[in-house]
Image: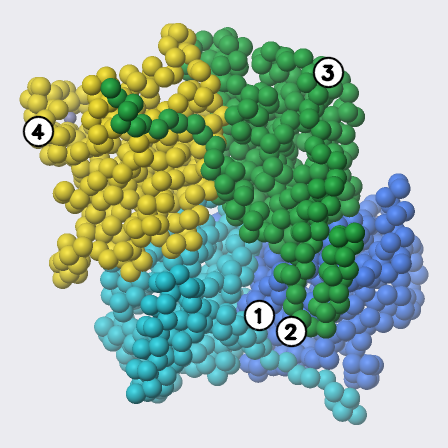
Chain colours: A yellow, B blue, C green, D cyan
Amino acid sequence: MAIFGKKYFKVELERLERKDDETLWMKCKACGELVFKKRVRENNNICPKCGEYFFLTAPERIELLVDPGSFEDISRPIVAADPLQFIDEDGKPYSEKVKKAQEETGLANEIIIGRARIGGYPVILAVMDFRFIGGSMGSVMGEQICQAIQYAVQERAALVLISATGGARMQEGILSLMQMAKTSAARKRLEDAKLPFISIMTYPTTAGVEASIASLGDITLAEKGALIGFTGRRVIKQTIRQELPEDFQTDRFAFEHGIVDNVVKREQLRDELIKILRLFAPLLAHSSAVAGEAHQREAIV
Amino acid sequence: MAIFGKKYFKVELERLERKDDETLWMKCKACGELVFKKRVRENNNICPKCGEYFFLTAPERIELLVDPGSFEDISRPIVAADPLQFIDEDGKPYSEKVKKAQEETGLANEIIIGRARIGGYPVILAVMDFRFIGGSMGSVMGEQICQAIQYAVQERAALVLISATGGARMQEGILSLMQMAKTSAARKRLEDAKLPFISIMTYPTTAGVEASIASLGDITLAEKGALIGFTGRRVIKQTIRQELPEDFQTDRFAFEHGIVDNVVKREQLRDELIKILRLFAPLLAHSSAVAGEAHQREAIV
Amino acid sequence: MIYEELQRQIEQLRALSRNGVDLSEEIARLEAKLAALKRQTATPAPSPAPSPELDDWERVKLARHPKRPYALDYIQALTEDFYELHGDRLYGDDAAVVAGIARFDGQTVVIVGTQKGRDATENVRRNFGMPHPEGYRKALRVMKLGERFGFPILTLIDTPGAYPGVGAEERNIGGALAQNIYELFNLKVPIIATIIGEGGSGGAIALAIGDRVLMLENAIYSVITPEGCAAILFRDASKAPEAARALKLTAPHLLRLGVIDEIVPEPPGGAHLDPEMALCALKSAWQRHLREVLALPVDVLQKQRREKFHKMGLYEEITESSFS
Amino acid sequence: MIYEELQRQIEQLRALSRNGVDLSEEIARLEAKLAALKRQTATPAPSPAPSPELDDWERVKLARHPKRPYALDYIQALTEDFYELHGDRLYGDDAAVVAGIARFDGQTVVIVGTQKGRDATENVRRNFGMPHPEGYRKALRVMKLGERFGFPILTLIDTPGAYPGVGAEERNIGGALAQNIYELFNLKVPIIATIIGEGGSGGAIALAIGDRVLMLENAIYSVITPEGCAAILFRDASKAPEAARALKLTAPHLLRLGVIDEIVPEPPGGAHLDPEMALCALKSAWQRHLREVLALPVDVLQKQRREKFHKMGLYEEITESSFS
Ligand SMILES: [Zn+2]
Ligand SMILES: [Zn+2]
């Protein structure tokens, strides 16, 4: 349990680099080629040979998007409780499952919230980590998202939510369902404050999260390769007893059915966010010098 | 032009009966049977043999719906102008076309607005007459509908709009199109005053009227046999070069596609309106004794 | 008495209003106060008769009992002049959702519910009470109509969940649910939600945001069906009874968890054995709660509604002393 | 100067505001006043250069010219950082409508327009600029997004009309147009509509409700296409040129009829011959009008918008003396 001591699990991006050092090479699952790990990381966790997207942890995602050195973890120091005293088939209580996830990920929870700048513009980030019990939404995620909204309002920052989640945290029962209500209710505060809410859906964004806060963005982006939908493919297949369309619940499907504003490649997400934030700049707290600069630079181009 | 003298075309229901007296019998177009005209009239202009709906003029429609003796024509004394100096292929100016329609129908315009009671509840009626240049919406209809809205607000009455129209009055050009805006803008006054707007779509309710005021009801009813849509069947067929679905733009189609709340048989329209008005009664001006009575009667049943 | 005095004051203000002064707000506030006063002297809420605690899985079976009263049964029995409205004005109508206007306790209300079918034919038409996006959009349209006229809203929830189908996903079922939840918080009229049978996950909560959330004694409300939970977590769908117990999806549990406000008692053995009694119990609960929420000014109502749901959830604080 | 004094006053109020007093309304009113004052001293609107009157049918052909600048050409040339948004969140996306956020003249704005294709492939994708309901619903969604943030709205109209197809009717195209018209009147931000090419009937007016309605010199705006009018009224579609003249669908006629506020001049021969000039003219018109409407408080803006359209129409009073 050594991990508990570290500043209550605060994420510090500088420490990320070291973790990969165990082996230098990895095999791409898609093309089978051996690729240099460092090269993959520099390439936004995309295979340099075939373009396959590898999984991004929440800290990696944050690193990918924010201005270097600007990120500060402001997660509320809370962790999951076990309201139902839930025990799964392996006889393991929910609380152990949570501890295991904490040890494996080095994170306190399935979501990190932080203050950062993106292209100089002030944002509050809320980023899910799918490794942590499927990034599912329990009471902690609900509360952290509400906290993120409150910070955004206090600091006049944009809210950027990055979803990577299988939905609600079953093990918290009805209380996980109620987080759909809790987060959707809080979302109004951003509207009242005229602050933009940008929702980014990645692989996967489904069920309880998709059917609440993630679908309430002013602007909604799908990361290329995203899976977006309410009900899982397997359940639908069982119900309708038919094959599903090839592109069912893909990024393209979501775009064609009017569910997302744009599909954005991972390597362009940061630039896309800067483009959007720039339009809302007058509503945000004073942007740093970088923003002004970046703005001018691009205005000339 | 004798007709012009009569109280500026005010509609008086008591005079209606006499017009039919020329012949006693008529042949049903649908079943070919000879039917007694008076019987047809008593049957809401529905063939007593086969159930075919015959056309209803605006005065006939009003008579069908209102409490006997309660109707008062409050149309503004205006008639169509000829803003474009429009002359059709027969060389006839628009103004003559209007005069001809006036003579043939005994009406000043394509719409009649009036104050009435339905089941004792106060309503302002706006009723189109398809015989009058296809019941198309020109500047007069736009103005009369706005007047009707104003009366409804002043008198705390429900607005009941009965559409029978091919759409905009082409001969008034862009000004007819602008009536879509004018009427839709005025509709807000009913909302602000918390007064119900019941839109009844009959055969036909299409184009400019369907795409504006007729689609803005709090409650929308289709009369059985109605034709409801924006673009005419012929134009669509020409465009897509395919056969149209059997039920295209029928009452059933509108219901199944979520466009109307209910499809109502002609002979039940009045009762249906009373049912609806009763629910809004607390928002309407004091209803007459009849309403209270009718209400109690039906509450017991 | 104090409230006769208040009543007189209100009438005087009304008279003034008729002379062109806008005092509607003041009048509304006084009326709220009056109602609150009256409430204090009224009879208190009946504490639910402590019927013998049934096993959770037994309750699941009761909640799904084919003879259990459905939404329209409550509507027909408890309201007068119900007028059903149809269609979302966008795509279609959905018979798995019923929505309309009615009179309840002398007051015009909007009622929206999910509706199961009583036999096979009706179940096909009602899709076993599993709505498509157009059902939720119809519901929202009608609830907004209620808001426009100041009619309070009653919702009745009895659904296995939103329909898991291709068309539903194509028409953004997730977005429809999210939109409903969001908009329900913003509605300017009182909302009383009642779980009468199955409260199935997202498809249920999209109609169950209310100033009061009531639940029938043998109803269930859950983030996932026991079968689904068993299949995913226990890798064995037949373990549904265990999952049902693990999920704490019955009314007594939910009351303890702070998710519902009140349990509406059912006759012993379930509402289907004596529907009259169940109907009666819901009627009196509605009357009591409706009177309470109607007495509140809109801003207070909305604030309380938000706060009520904001409090839901359970987590633990980490403090430095947690680690030693 | 008086408006420096006013400026100072506004700043003082702002300072007060920071101490917790809500003076936003007062500040807004003063700012409007200030802007109005500034406007009075600004340069007046240029009266459109009286280019030789073209025949109405010639104008129809110019309005439909395949090389004419389309909505995206104006957006790309006149705005910065245009960010296009997609989808109606209900059913689909519609490439016949473009909608997004951009910066114009230092101000974030929402822009919505109908978009034709430049070649066959693009025209298939853009459906020749004829939107389906999802296009109008996307437009409304994005305009409401603009309203939420206080961004003024610019619309660009260039469409033969809403698409006449089965799917459009199934998804209630008439209702979608009606809803847009209705909601545009209620939006709390300034709206400037510009007819840049074809303004085709209901499909055009559903985006053309504005505090200002501008029209390019060779654009047309009509209740029906000349071909449609000829077919119905003259029973001969080839008589479109006559119908075009009869319909009075060109900018000078519409200015006279009080339907548009200003004609935006085009280069001789049409905008496609010197797009730069057309773009420039629209830019300066937008700047001028935007400044004016931004100066108005919301309630005044909405009232004027309603009144503007309420006045449209022409009829004759019947008086007793009409009959003799
Ligand atoms: Zn690879
Ligand atoms: Zn017959």
Reading the chain from its start, which is encountered first: label 2 or label 1? 2
Q: Which residue is mark 1?
A: B182
The reply to whether the C-beta atoms of the residues labelled 2 and 1 are less than 8 Å apart is: yes
Q: Which residue is mark 4?
A: A38
Q: Return the x and y of residue B92 as percentages of the image width and height.
A: 63, 80
Q: Which residue type carries mark 2?
A: Glu
Image position of C188 (left or right of D105): right
Q: Secondary structure at mark 4?
A: helix
Q: CA distance from mark 2 to mark 1?
A: 8 Å
Q: CA distance from mark 4 to mark 3?
A: 67 Å
Same-chain status of marks 2 and 3: no
Image quarter of residue C14: bottom right
In front: B202, or C221? C221
**What residue sits 74% from the left and 25% below the top?**
C278
Q: CA distance from mark 4 to mark 1?
A: 65 Å
Q: Which residue type carries mark 3?
A: Pro
